Every structure is written in C-alpha cells, then in structure tokens.
Image (cartoon, rainbow, N blue to C red):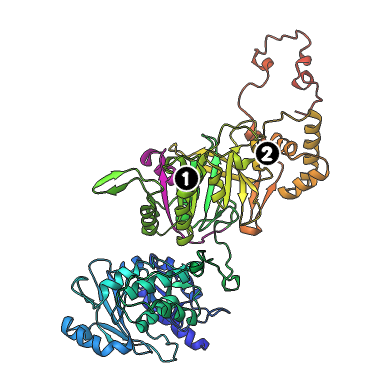
Amino acid sequence: MSAAATAALLAAARRYRERGLSVVAVSGKRPTDRWARYIDELPGPLELEALFSASERHEPTGLAVVLGAATWANHPGLFVVEIEARHRAEAELWLDEHLPNWRAGLVAQSGGGSLHLYLAAPAEVATRTFKWGEVRGRGSVTVLPPSLHPNGRPYHWLSKGEPLRVEPDALALPGAEAGRRAYGALGEGPVGEGRRNGTLTSLGGALRRSGLDAAIIEATLQHLNAQRCEPALPEDEVASIAASVSRYEPGAPWQPTPAGAERGGLSPVVVKLADVQPEQVRWLWPGKIPLGKVTVLDGDPGLGKSLVTLDLAARTSTGCPMPDSTRGLGAPAGVVLLSAEDDLSDTIRPRLDAAGADCSRIVALTAVRVDDKERFATLADIAAIREAIVRVGAKLVIIDPLMAYIATDAHVDADVRSRLAPLTKLAAELGVAVVVIRHLNKAGGGNALYRGGGSIGIIAAARSGLLVARDPEDATGERRILACTKSNLAKMPPALAYRIVANADGAVRVEWIEETAHTASQLLAAPTGDDERGAMDEAKDWLRSELMTGARPSKVLQREARGAGIADITLRRAREALGIRPQRVGYGSAGEWMWALPTTAEQASSKPKMLNMPIDAHPKSMSIYGDDEHLSSPARSLGLEEGEL
C-alpha cells in the first residue's frame, strides 16, 4: 500500500480507538502483530503508530476490532455474526423472520461479499461456528471498514446504526450449538508452532461430527488458521486437513488413524525448523526475569525475598524502570500475588505503598470458590490463576512461597513437574512472568542450583534462577545481594546489592545500591575470615591514589585492582573503610556506577556521635597519665603519627 493509504488506515484506527474500540492492524485478514494483549487493554497512541507501520514481514492492508474486556468497557457485550457470501440469501431470510430490524443496526460487508452483523448481548458470547458462518466473541478479531479484502475490494458499512441488543439464547442460529461444542478444541489465544496441525485437525473432526459439509469445514479451518495460528499454516496444508476429516460420514465417530498404526507402531509429531519463526526473548527485567517463563527466587528467611518481589510488583504496576535502570515492559501492567505468609492489610499493602505501587493494578488471589464454598488456592487451580491474570492484564505473577501452593510432595520430582507443567504452559500462553519463592535447604556450600528447597525439578523447570544472601563483606550485616544462579536465555547478569530501609510510617522497602562482582556460589560458600591487615592497607592506599583526581567507574576500578593483585573482597572492604558510597550516573545501558572519595563534610556527618576511646570518658581534671598528659594523645596511643586519624 502507498504511504497515503497507510496513513488513512492509521487515521481510521485512531477514530475507532477514540470511540472505545480496541483495534489492531491486519494484513489480509490476519493481525500483523501479537494481538492477544489487546483483548484486555486498548492500544496506546504510540502502539497504534507501531502497529500500522509497514515492516519487511508485514504491510498493513486493514484494521480489525479485538473483542474482549477492553472493547466491552465502552461497548458492553459487543459480538459479531459473520455470514459467508454464498449463504447470505438464505441467512437474510432467516434474519428477517427472527430479527426483523437487523438492517437498521450496525452492518458491514466485506470485500468478498460476506455480511458482518454487529450485535450486543447482556452476557459474554462465546466464539463458535454455525451453519452459515461464524459468531465472533471474546478473544477473536473481525475486520473493519475501510480495510481491503485480499481480492483488492474494500470493506464498507451497509448501515451505521447502533448494535442491536439481543439475548444470546434468543438468537438460535442454525448449527450454532454443534459449532460451540466443536470450538472447544481451539481454546483461547493464539495457536503457536507445535499445536497448529493437531488443533485444526481436532476442530475439523468435531465439525464433521456435528454434520457440517466439507466446504464449510475447509472455509472454517482456513479462516481460523489465518486468524489464530501464529504463524499461519500454508493454505494447501489446511485444505489437506479439511479433506482428510471430511472422508468420514457426517455424525460418525471420528478418530485419526496414526501413520504406522497398521504396523503396530507410533507416528512421530515433528516440526520442520524452517517453518519456525525466530523470536526474541521478551523480558520483565532484562537478563533476570523473562516474560512467558518461570523464575525461581531462593534465599534464607529474613533477607527480604518477599520485599524484593513487591518492589518488582510496584515497578511493573507503574511501568517504572527496573532496579538497574533497564526498561522491561515500558508501560504499566497488572500483577497477581499468591502470598501465604504475609497479611494483606498490615504487611503487603503498606510495603507496596512504600515502593510507590499502583495498587489498582495488583490483585491477591486468596482463595477459590467451589459450590459457594471457598478454599485455599493451589497450583492445581490453573483456571483461577488464568482468570486473575486476565482480569488485571497481569505481566507478573508472584507465588510466595512455592511450597505452600504446590499441593504435593515437593521432593518427588515427577509430582513437582506435573504441578509446574500447567503453570509453565500458562506463562508461555499469556506472556506473563511467573516468579516463585523458595527457602534454602540446610546443606552448606555446594552448587547454588542444589540449595533451593524441594526437588531439583523446580529449578530445572525454571528458565532463570535468582538468589538473595547477606553480603559476606559487610560487617554490619545490613547489606544483601541479589545474584543469578541460572540463566538459560541470556548471559549471567551482574549481581545487585541492596538494603532494607524504613519509611517514616515504619513500612519497609528495598533500597538498591550498586552492581557487584559477587556470584551465587561465593555468597553460599562458608566465610573464610578477614584478609591480612597489610593487604587491606595496601588496597586503601591504592584506592585513595586512584580517586584523588575525582570519581571513576566502579567496573574500571575493579578491573584495575585485579591487575594490581588486589582481591575483590579486599577492595570492597577498603571502599567501605574509606566511606565511599557508590552513585549511579545516567540511565539504562548508558548508566554506570561511580566511586568517589567522600568530601570533608560527608566525613564529618558520618562520624558517630559517641565516645570512641576509653580515655575520653575521664574528666579533664583527672588524668591517668599524671604530668605526662601528652602521652594520652589518641594518635600516639595507637602507634600512629599525628594527622593520620
């Protein structure tokens, strides 16, 4: 399409968006981008521009409305009845009898001559097929005027009235009940590689059993392939599936015969890698927490594991950058909490407020209701977890702790994997990051991957693993480290230091400090004791000389210190001893941590206001040194020269 035609489509999309419709770009009849997220949220202005920008893979030829919560917020219960062009005459006679004023409602015609009747219902209408076409409900898209049909002719409005309100049960479309049952094979959301052939074959068989003829089955499968399969299968392959299932008698039990069954063997299910479209990993926190995957966070009690996840929840709900200034989602999203240990009112809500969260985007799944009775939720309640995710448009699910929700023996590998498999599948399907929290086991040292509680199958199922531990170089015990134990999708990211601080109202939050060179293995290793005093003094002298001219990047200093034979642990102790507080300068990939010597004012403000030497506790008039008062000089008493204190 020309630039002018694309601009006209974008302008039309903006007008529809202003009227409260969730719209996406289509190429032919297929959305040009992943559209499932727009079921529950309207695309923003910048997102619209991106959707309607031509790329090497797709060129927009039209636009479509996504039916679901986002559109229903402004147009409650909107659904569409699509009638194929070859059935229009018969269908219009039926509509004239059962819905006499349908022509005065909101009606469009596709470039191929099919009829699109826009209706509204008081309750959610399910997507399904019927004798003359398809009913499009939640989780589906339908093309809008002025889009171009693949044959080059435009869609246009036949009538621009209001969508007619109908009772779903009153609109008894011929063959719709069979279509509703058949559509159960399709499920919700996009159908990706590895599921396309099986899903379309299962659906085709169900349609054949419901009595539909070969032509309708092929048309239905072609349409669903174009709309729901990502990427779509070749049309001749879909036609072959339709022809195969249509060989059976209508209404007869249908079951595919596996190739090789006559030999008593099994047939393989394979995916040609040439048909697989490469995709980049999407991140909630780049390098640390991937979207669509499970991440495990391990650590001993009392180190702030839950507090770290609430900090991430706050950042997700507001669209703020991650602790290292990287940007993940770049826009606010919902969060689902499953917390079995902390109270919502006196712990979780105050901590979220302290972290600056948008609590309107965060929900806690506290129970499930079965037959008017509530019970504790577990990972077996995957449907309830799915509904909670969809309800707030969540991109982060936190399960704290995992062992409270796994509802099986967490040490039996097979049981654990069977519980985690549906959760892993749900994360991939909805593109949501799932973070599960575990306590460490009692074993000391060893490989960090084996220190988490329960079966090794837990960390095996995760694509990323994180660990919180005390900083072994911090004498105060207040500084903690978040390090990576496992990273299947990116190189190992650097560890981050943090401390827990309290707001004026007493609510605690995480204060992130800087990147560190710690590794998970080092953090879990047994302590080795202090370095020799000579090495410490040497490190302090070296650090002073390097910072005399001003601040320098911490990474550069650490690298040069290693070259000078100074160990990381010694360098950090020297930094703490000199009162150097790292500061981050810049944002995102351009930002870096800087070290600088403290100013005189900073040194003075940091001195403890207490008696430092026993001799200072004596009155001036009572000297323990008699006439040799000069011998009580603090510098001399420590064996130092004057001016070194």
Percent position of residue 436, x then y: 49, 46
Q: Is residue 100 left or right of residue 15?
A: left
Label 1 CA crowd tier, 10 Å (few <14, some 14–19, many 20+) = some
Is 142 in the magenta? no
Tell me what residue is drawn at x 82 percent, y 25 percent: 641
Tell me what residue is drawn at x 48 percent, y 61 percent: 331
Percent position of residue 151, x then y: 44, 91
Tell me what residue is drawn at x 41 percent, y 46 percent: 338
For label 2, the residue is 522
Q: Amino acid at mark 2?
A: Gln
Which image quadrant: the C terminus? top right
Q: Is residue 94 above or below residue 375?
A: below
Task: Between residue 186 and residue 526, name the one nearer to us.
Answer: 186
Q: Is residue 142 above or below residue 73?
A: below
Q: CA distance from mark 2 to mark 1?
A: 32 Å
Dividing the picture into quarters, in which one does residue 568 lie? top right
Which of marks 1 and 2 precedes in the sequence? Answer: 1
